[in-house]
Amino acid sequence: MGIDGCSHDDKQIYDKLREDYLISLGLKVYRITVDDIIKQMEFVIIGLEEYIIAEYGT
């Protein structure tokens, strides 16, 4: 899981390379914005739960 905030601004190439590397290791990436965490935590949790169920089953 990655939480993207302003520290990721203008780092799209670096982030893509890092994400590709993590995926090459067999890991999955689920991105959440800091703004969503601050303003919509309930929806973040629901989205993460749905992602986990879809990817790993119940």
Image (tube, grey):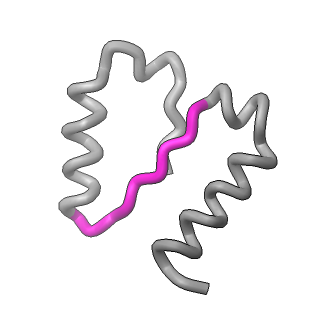
Residue at image location 28% in from the left, 46% down from the top: 19
Q: Position of residue 11 (x, y in %)?
A: 30, 20
Total marks drawn? Answer: 0
Give the answer, above or below, for where 20 lies relative to 55. above
Q: Which residues are magenta?
A: 25-33
Q: Tell me which secondary structure the magenta stretch mostly adopts.
A: loop
Q: Specify whether 29 is left or right of 31.
A: left
Q: Specify whether 38 is left or right of 9.
A: right
Q: Is residue 57 magenta?
A: no
Give the answer, above or below, for where 10 lies relative to 1. above
Q: Farthest residue in the top direction?
A: 10
Residue at image location 56% in from the left, 40% down from the top: 32
Quadrant location of the C terminus in the rendered image: bottom right
Give the answer, above or below, for where 18 lies relative to 14. below
Q: In this rendered view, identify the residue nearer to me: 25 or 32.
A: 32
Residue at image location 78% in from the left, 29% down from the top: 39
Q: Is residue 32 magenta?
A: yes
Q: Position of residue 1 (x, y in %)?
A: 49, 51
Q: Specify whether 13 is left or right of 36.
A: left
Residue at image location 72% in from the left, 57% down from the top: 46
Quarter of the image where one finds residue 45: bottom right
Q: Farthest residue in the bottom direction?
A: 58
Q: Position of residue 28 (x, y in %)?
A: 37, 61
